[in-house]
Amino acid sequence: MIVRKAREEETASIETVTLAAYEQYAAVKSEAHWKRYRKGILHTLSEEKKFECIVAEIDGEMAGSVLFYRPNTDVYGGLLKPFPWAEIRLLAVAPSHRRKGVANALLEACEKKISGARVFLFRFTYRSFNGTCH
């Protein structure tokens, strides 16, 4: 497995993997809710200048991705004051690559980006439609 910074030409692959990873929620929510959620995912992915996208590939295939926001980044478009800690969003693993350590490798890459910081905090947001983590 190779974990690295995403390249510009991989935008479509990242979008495909992310939507495939989150598609499972379409079955447990109303069609209207899924459409809004999907639209939010695509909007977040389009805000390239705000984050660094880290990807994992296995045998040349995109296996997963995560968005890494440095501390004090305006993640929420001015709705909230920027947080003094890094934030990780849209951790996604392609269904065909689950249970292979992809998510762990992506999170470790994020952790390395802020190692040496005085305070280290992962803030996970759980929503009822997310169900259990796999």
Image (cartoon, grey):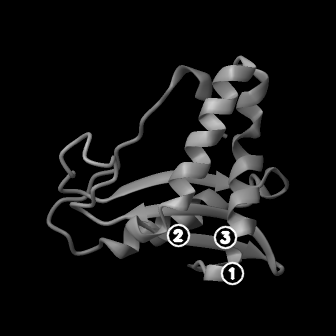
Label 3 crowding class (10 Å Cα cut-off): few <14, some 14-19, many 20+? some
Depth check: give the residue in front, 95 or 45: 45
Q: Give the vertical position of 18 relative to 64 (above or below).
A: above
The mark found on residue 53 in the picture is 2
Q: What residue lies at 48% left-to-right and 72% top-to-bottom?
A: 109
Mark 2 or 1 closer to N-term?
1
Which mark's residue is nearer the viewer, 2 or 1?
Answer: 1
SS state under label 1:
helix
Q: What residue lies at 71% left-to-right and 30% top-to-bottom?
A: 25
Q: Amino acid at mark 1?
A: Glu
Q: Give the vertical position of 21 relative to 120 (above or below).
A: above
Residue contact between numbered discs 2 and 3, judged by CB atoms under 8 Å: no
SS state under label 2:
strand
Which mark's residue is nearer the viewer, 2 or 3?
Answer: 3
Residue indicated by mark 3: 11
- State how far apart marks 3 and 1 are (Cα): 6 Å
Q: Amino acid at mark 2?
A: Cys
- State how far apart marks 2 and 1 are (Cα): 12 Å
Q: Amino acid at mark 3?
A: Thr
* Quadrant the N terminus occupies: bottom right
Residue contact between numbered discs 3 and 1, judged by CB atoms under 8 Å: yes
The mark found on residue 58 in the picture is none
